[in-house]
Amino acid sequence: MTEIGAPIVPLHVAIIMDGNGRWAKSRGLPRPLGHRAGIEAVRRTITASVDQGVGYLTLYSFSSENWRRPDTEIGELMGLLRFYLRSELANLHKEQVRVRVIGERKKLPVDIVELIDHAEELTHENKKLTLTLALNYGGRQEITAAAHGLAKAVERGQLKADAIDEHVFQSFLFTGGMPDPDLVIRTSGEKRISNFLLWQSAYAEYVFMDVLWPDFGGDHLAQAIAEFKSRDRRYGATASKS
């Protein structure tokens, strides 16, 4: 186990990608062009994560609350998701990136679910980086679903109620089998977590950055990781000795 407070590269980085709309508005462009520019930032961030030695990268791509947006914008976002999964998968696989998707899939279009299933199956054995896309995802939704799954397991006699602890509960989350995020980044200057990885980020370090997501790149990731390294992670213990 790594020594508390040791300046290591975070194994798992999670990012709340915020600011596409404001990026477009500031340039007098329609919102969809901000989302398209955001895809370029995703590409840069994946490359930078591999270069930095990050093992897991989780991107908050579409929240369960995003369905409240106008139908035209939702349609544009779904179209971009289709484009990304189709156009990027071959290169992600070539670069040994594993693709995972967390969130409720029932509300997603059938063809997108098929693309997700194909991406996960194709890249399952890849080891260089695990890229997780949070789609139709919400932290409270995830915890509720996990509690429901646990209740069903107890009801079926597959699990005894007394056996439920944090480890068992965590295995029922969408992220079961993944390490918790060490570093959570939010772009655009907003300072809230927006229902993202509520259970998993209990001891994560948060870095809030003023850059809008379409402008995010390797230098910004390096800056956030440097901030992460400067912090004394105590996990409830006393401060480490200098």
Image (cartoon, grey):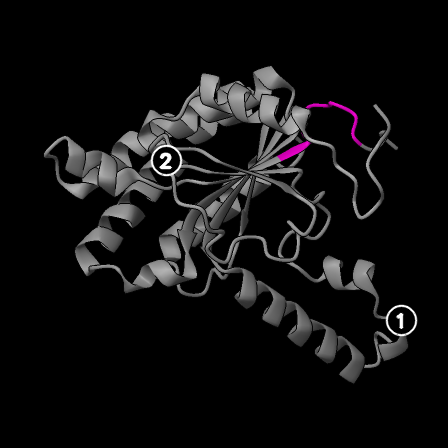
Placement of 163 over or under 110, stated as above or below: below
Placement of 227 over or under 166, stated as above or below: above
Residue name at image x 24 percent, y 34 percent: 23
Residue 235 relative to residue 197: left or right: right
Total marks in image:
2
Circle 2 residue: 84
Location of the N terminus by quadrant is top right
**Majority secondary structure of magenta residues:** loop
- Residue 96 picture location, percent across and down: 60, 23
Disc 1 on helix, strand or loop? helix
Instruction: Residue 19: say if magenta.
Output: no
- Residue 35 picture location, percent across and down: 27, 38
- Residue 146 picture location, percent across and down: 66, 68
Local packing at callout 2 (Cα closer than 10 Å; few below 14, some 14-19, many 20+) is few
Q: Marks 2 and 1, Cα distance to the nearest angstrom? A: 42 Å
Residue name at image x 65 percent, y 57 percent: 199
Q: Is residue 96 visible?
A: no
Residue 144 relative to residue 47: left or right: right
Placement of 167 over or under 14, stated as above or below: below
Kind of residue sitting beneath label 1: Ala
Kind of residue sitting beneath label 2: Tyr
Local packing at callout 1 (Cα closer than 10 Å; few below 14, some 14-19, many 20+) is few
Residue name at image x 38 percent, y 39 percent: 189
Magenta segment boundaries in residue numbering: 5-12
Circle 1 residue: 163
Q: Nearer the viewer, residue 105 or 117?
A: 105
Disc 2 on helix, strand or loop? helix
